[in-house]
Image (spheres, rainbow, N blue to C red):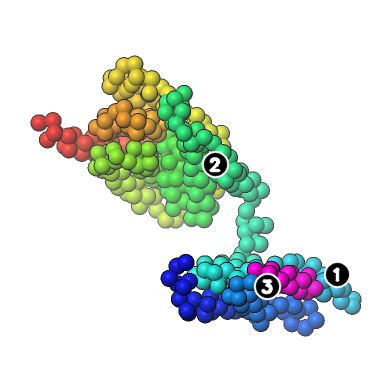
Amino acid sequence: MTPAESSPFAPWLGLAAALGGGLLIGLERERRKGSGAARAAAGIRSFTLAAVGGGIAQTLQQPPLVALGALLVVLLSAVAYWKSRERLPGRPLPDPGLTTELALFITYLVGVLSVQQPTLGAGAAVAVATLLAARERLHRFATVLLSESELHDALLLAALALVLLPLMPATPQPWLGGMAPRTLLLTAVLILSLQAAGHVALRLLGARAGLAVSGLFSGFVSSTATIASMGARARAEPAQRGACLAGALFSTTATWLQVLLMVAALAPAALPTLLPSALAGAVASLAGAALAWRQAGAAMAPAAAAHGPLRLREALAVSAMLGAVAVLVAWGQRHFGQAGLMVGTALAALADAQSPVAALATLHGEGRIQAAALRDGVLLGVLSNSLTRGVTGFVAGGRGFGAAVLLSLVMSTGTALMVAWALAAPAGG
């Protein structure tokens, strides 16, 4: 029993929370109640009494009384619903819905909860009242703003995150280079979540800000793919070239941030060794992206997403590549030592910078490489992937677009390498 629960004022605090919660929910329902013969059966007094009744029943610590009170509220709600379905003279049979009746029962439960945990009960009351008050906005969101494909993708993401992810094995597997299957699926879920965030930003913020934010989020999935997409869009829509370039450069910033996040998750002990150089690269990349965004100009037409919110095939491909690269890097390190580790990292990073970083972090977590080797491998991987991204910028966006992307990559990667060299020089001397 907590001190709050053992206090003589605890019952009064719980009943006060129940009273406040009932008044809050009842106030919202009273405004929806209407008037005349068509008014709803329950208003501010009914909801307040239901909450206080639940609080009193719980205060008496009589479980049968709590259950009886809940049954009484259910019966009264059923009667109210049946009365609201009565046909008025000259009018069709109304469809009142069940919101008020369900809210009345939940308010009773809020009263019970408020006595047990006043803070949680008060929070629940606020959440219920907010949900009830947002009726029009939720209805518009569900029927107007949310498209069929967006609803489908939201359900898919929820199923992956809440159903399939907990079922995946969480223990490292030797055949995956020491990675866990759940880590691979978690990577796909995170990629899909970032895609969704970028899609929302593009719809809400327009071209200039939306493409920048979308580029940043998409960079966590694949900076190379983002640069290709932004370059192609810049060719097709010259008026949005500046915003597309800013989005492409923000994706390179995301690469550095993702490197830090992956190392923090998989090899936290090595983070202090990598942090100065990776952070320097991120700051240099962010400065170039911010400059491009500022020069893009604010007068731009709204941007429309060129694809659906989620690209499941792309997310699964990145996760599969991560697993394959983990196996490759672990094999190279096991058979050829440090040289094989670096060569395998550089070759794998030509396609994707994220996978070799995850593989290196996994090896460090297993104690097979030192923090300095992890840092050197990460920087080598980002440098190798910068070659691919630079070429992609020229091919997708043309000479000017590619030159700007390449300059940003040279500046950010060069800054990171110089910081790493400066910090390692005293130890080497």
Q: Which mark is residue 65?
A: 3
Whole-Å distance between the Cαs marked 2 and 3? 38 Å
Q: Is residue 48 magenta?
A: no
- How many numbered discs? 3
- Camera-side residue of 125 and 427: 125
Closer to us: 287 or 146: 146
Residue 4, image x and y in percent?
Answer: 45, 72
Magenta part mainly helix, strand or loop? helix
Q: Residue furthest top?
A: 335
**Residue beneath disc 2:** 166
In the rendered structure, does residue 79 fall within the stretch colored magenta?
A: yes
Q: Secondary structure at mark 1?
A: loop
- For mark 1, what is the residue? 93
Q: Amino acid at mark 1?
A: Leu
Answer with mark 3 or mark 1, whichever residue precedes in sequence.
3
The residue furthest right is: 90
- Amino acid type indicated by mark 3: Leu
Q: Is residue 15 above or below residue 405?
A: below
Question: Compared with residue 378, is residue 189 higher up or lower down, i.e. above or below?
Answer: below
**Would residue 249 be seen by someone viewing this image from the given angle?**
no
What is the distance, in whole Å, between disc 1 and disc 2 at their CAs?
46 Å
Residue found 89% across the figure and 78% down from its top: 89
Q: Which stretch did the figure color magenta? A: 63-80
Q: Amino acid at mark 2?
A: Pro
Q: Is residue 109 left or right of residue 396?
A: right
- Asked whether, in this view, residue 313 is left or right of residue 136, the answer is left
Q: Residues within 10 Å of mark 2 (few under 14, many from 20)?
A: few
Is tag 2's residue or tag 3's residue first in the polypeptide sequence?
3
